[in-house]
Image: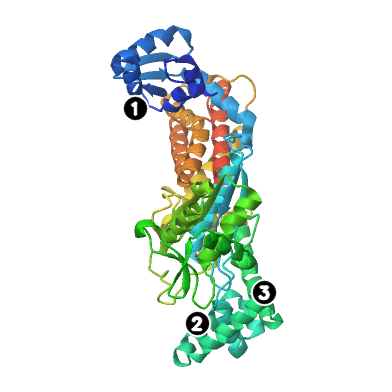
Amino acid sequence: MDYKKKISELVSIEGFSQSDIFELIALPKDTSLGDYCIPCFKFAKALRKAPVIIAQDLANAVKDKCDFAEVEAVAGYLNFKLDRMQVAKQTLEDIMTQKEKYGSSDLGKDKTICIDFSSVNIAKPFHMGHMLNTSIGSALYKLYKVLGYNVVGINHLGDWGTQFGKLIVAYKMWGDKKDIEERGVRGLLDIYVKFHKEAEEKPELEDEARAWFKKIEDGNKEALDLFYWFKEITMKEVDKIYKRLDVTFDSYNGESFYNDKMQPVLDELKAKGLLVESEGAQVVKFDNDEMPPSLLVRSDGATLYATRDMAAAFYRKNTYDFYKCLYVVAYQQDLHFKQLFKTIEMMGYDWAKDMVHVAHGMVSLEDGSMSTRGGHVVFLEDVLNTTVSKALKVIEEKNPNLENKAEVAEQVGVGAVIFAMLYNSRIKDITFSYDKVLSFEGETGPYIQYTYARCNSLLEKCGDVVGDIDYSGIDNDSAAEVIRTLGKYQDTLIDAANKYEPCLISRYAINLAQEFNKFYFDCNIANAEQPIKNARLLLTKAVKQVIANALKILGMATPNKM
Ligand code: ARG
């Protein structure tokens, strides 16, 4: 039931449209005052009256014309209280008829959103930093789908650059095909590190590397074969991780894809007088030096990451005609994206405003072992395997007779890491702690999954809802809190989408789980009389459904038993 819509139809104020009023409707901070409110301060000027009077007049005007339980003016606010039982019935009915569709919408109809996320680098480890990026991007991807958008997930692979020349030189010197095939990126990383050590003493290796990279650029067969092989090895590993995380993409067009698409953009920049020469290189300068110039062609003619991103922006606009193009990338690249968007704006394209850098923080491990500088990189695969085996240990202690223990441990372990990535506003840095993320209490993945499993066992134990439903069984404060939260699900999704903040969904899920657990302790379910029990079971079913819907967006599984 759309109460906000109902209210906006009920209240009319000269000079304000129905949708103006809709926008103003808010949720009162103090829930005892009402379920919705309209702050009347905005109307004061137009009506030449004090907000307190306006609220009072409106209350008198609509009071008897509606079926809200109470309409009251308090300190310039017009408050609406719903009939608790009517809301309960309506909300539970909505959830039980819409099921996994509950919360979805057609808000995004005919609109395409491109999301550039994960965007891993070939021949480099898929480390913890990418986990945050991948989880945020994938959650947004699923969220926009639920809201009816056409979504294009793009993995802008880092598959270009001189490092591939270095890898070829290293491979030709020390490479062992079998070892690399077995150990994958770890094998590649070893020879890459070795290259850097050797090159300190033999700088001529760098020249050789440049020459090999040039061969890749020129399409030399031997060079390209190796390049594709490195890529294949990396993608095999990365795909395994994406499968575990339930992450999918619609395009893997990475940096190399744009090799032949940069020149037209550079030509256009030049024609528009935006590309200027500076010490032999070609750069775009910004007004009043608000930012450092953006380097697009080096003095030796080489293009850069930024050049490929310019080409990619045009390619995406032309291919997908996006409504928005999101870049889920760490905040270290703030300047890069500011320059990119500004350059496109300076070229005269108003769609520059539709590109958004969805910036996020960094992840480090509690013991500090994340520092790449110390040469010690933590592979995401190792972190996932560690959490899964720790989860298995806990299950073995707490529920030794559980069937499919390994499967549940995978769901809990991986889910714990995902949830930890998505619990804070994305810009915050995260310190990852195995104990914290795996705790069954507190604001964690296992806690939510456990609540889901609790709903499930309760329903299994009590059987389905049969016969009459006496809603007075959920006419109490703890049930009312749960129902209010259930009813806010779609608003939460929309809010999360508008702010690019999956944490609003994970926080919602925690909140729902906590409220449900309070209800569960406050109200006897199993031994209540059937019609009362039915109302409580229905509530449990609805909570189970909404937790499942929310976790699906976050990318987490919902084991029936834990
Ligand atoms: N591969 C890059 C990195 O790891 C991220 C790419 C982000 N996407 C983009 N279009 N620039 O830093």
The mark closer to the camera, 2 or 3, is: 3
Farthest right residue? Answer: 221
Rendered view: 426 above or below 199:
above
Q: Mark 2 and 1 residues: CB-CB less than 8 Å, in contact?
A: no
- In the image shown, does 513 or 498 lie closer to the viewer? 498
Count residues near mark 2 (Cα–Cα under 10 Å), then give few for <14, some for 14-19, many for 20+. Answer: some
Identify the coloring.
rainbow
- Secondary element at image label 1: loop
Q: Is residue 508 visible?
A: yes
Q: Mark 3 or mark 1, which is nearer the start of the sequence? A: 1
Mark 2 residue CB less than 8 A from any atom of ligand 1: no
Q: Position of residue 313 (x, y in %)?
A: 56, 56
In the image, is 483 to the left or to the right of 253? left
- In the image shown, does 56 or 351 lie closer to the viewer? 351
**Marks 2/1: CA–CA distance:** 59 Å
**Marks 1/3: CA–CA distance:** 60 Å
Q: Mark 3 or mark 2, which is nearer the start of the sequence? A: 2
In the image, is 26 to the left or to the right of 232? left
